[in-house]
Image (cartoon, helix red, strand yellow):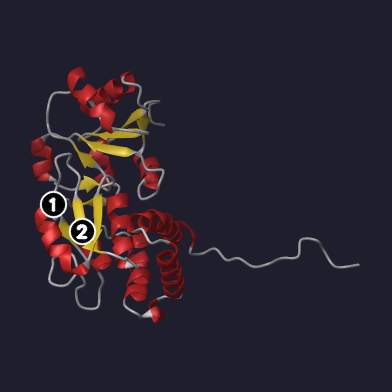
């Protein structure tokens, strides 16, 4: 059993990728990050600095909800920051066993190296074509759930994506001739999973569904047609792309949980009232 102010790796793993995931802070020293640059999926790396009360007062207004702090092995570094955050009124725990235990257990990690554009607050910034349907909703969902929960997404006219990317310092995605785009028969969602190193069974299964719906290959999985129908319906319901993105987050949350937890479950109607008399 973990300590009262700790969370075990398997407990945290059930939350990562879902709307209930806590904010995960990676506070490993720079030398540790250099030897293993992977982050726990969705973790936010903090600059190496002293864990003083003044530092925490600067950090805590940017945090909300539960927080999990991860250091190398779950010792004083993460326990100290978690304690300081609790002193500031936040619900905070440290990861039992730290980053090392998470990696040893084979739990999802993310390679942050492909992220090349951050704003002054350390958030990744992305831009793509307006009026999204599938890939341009699926990719933001993947990033916010597994890479950068604070990521910023911009939707602009197709002809303006490149200029807006240069103007605001954003990474263009799901347009031709950019790094984050379709490759061969795979869609941008596939590209992101590969480049971020997020190859886990549930995401691989979801990627096949997204790929089929996004590239008119509905035969790849029975669920492709359902995702296409729901996505087109959302597009008709929302004229505001960001409103559509927020609605789409729930849609992909549901598909992900099905891919992770419910693929073996079946449903049928049963007559619970008994035979008619």
Tell me the residue at 20%/58% (across/down): 127
Tell me the residue at 71%/65% (across/down): 270
Question: Disc 2 on helix, strand or loop?
Answer: strand
Closer to the camera, 148 or 107?
148
Which residue is identified by label 2?
Answer: 127
| Crowd rating for badge 2 (residues with CA inside 10 Å; few <14, some 14–19, many 20+) | many
Tell me the residue at 25%/74% (across/down): 186
Which residue is identified by label 1?
Answer: 168
Question: Left or right of 36: which side holds 144?
Answer: right
Q: Judge whether 115 appears above or below 137 on screen.
A: above
Residue 62 drawn at (x, y percent)? 26, 32
Residue 133 drawn at (x, y percent)? 35, 68
Closer to the camera, 119 or 193?
119
Q: Quadrant of residue 53?
A: top left
Identify the residue at the far right of this view.
277
Q: Quadrant of the N terminus?
A: top left
Closer to the camera, 90 or 168?
168
Question: Left or right of 271: which side holds 225?
Answer: left
Cα separation, mark 1 vs mark 2, equals 9 Å
**In the image, which disc is placed on residue 148?**
none
Res 4 seen here: yes
Q: Quadrant of the C terminus?
A: bottom right
Residue 110 drawn at (x, y percent)? 22, 51
Tell me the residue at 17%/41% (across/down): 122
Q: Judge whether 73 appears above or below 225 on screen.
A: above
- The mark nearer the N terminus, 1 or 2, is 2
Mark 1 and 2 residues: CB-CB less than 8 Å, in contact?
A: yes
Residue 201 drawn at (x, y percent)? 35, 62
Closer to the camera, 31 or 153?
153
Q: Judge whether 211 appears above or below 152 on screen.
A: below
Q: Judge whether 223 appears above or below 17 on screen.
A: below
Res 169 seen here: no
């Amino acid at each position: 059993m973990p300590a009262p102010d700790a969370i075990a790796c398997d407990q945290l793993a059930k939350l990562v990728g879902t709307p209930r995931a806590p904010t995960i802070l990676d506070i490993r020293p720079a030398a540790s990050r250099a030897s293993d640059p992977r982050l726990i999926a969705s973790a936010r790396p903090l600059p190496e600095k002293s864990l003083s009360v003044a530092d925490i007062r600067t950090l805590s207004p940017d945090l909300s909800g539960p927080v999990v702090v991860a250091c190398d092995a779950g010792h004083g570094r993460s326990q100290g920051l978690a304690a300081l955050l609790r002193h500031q009124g936040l619900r905070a725990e440290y990861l039992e066993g730290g980053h090392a235990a998470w990696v040893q257990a084979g739990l999802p990690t993310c390679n942050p190296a492909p992220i090349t554009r951050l704003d002054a607050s350390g958030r990744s910034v992305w831009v793509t074509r307006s009026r999204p349907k599938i890939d341009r909703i699926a990719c933001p969902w993947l990033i916010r759930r597994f890479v950068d929960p604070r990521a910023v997404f911009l939707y602009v006219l197709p002809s303006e994506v490149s200029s807006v990317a240069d103007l605001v310092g954003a990474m263009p995605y799901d347009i031709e001739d950019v790094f984050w785009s379709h490759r061969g028969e795979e869609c941008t969602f596939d590209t992101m999973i590969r480049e971020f190193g997020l190859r886990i069974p549930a995401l691989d299964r979801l990627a096949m569904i997204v790929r089929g719906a996004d590239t008119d290959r509905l035969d790849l999985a029975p669920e492709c047609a359902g995702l296409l129908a729901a996505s087109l319906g959302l597009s008709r319901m929302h004229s505001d792309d960001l409103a559509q993105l927020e609605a789409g987050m729930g849609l992909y949350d549901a598909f992900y949980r099905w891919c992770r937890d419910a693929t073996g479950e079946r449903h049928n109607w049963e007559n619970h009232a008994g035979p008619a008399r």
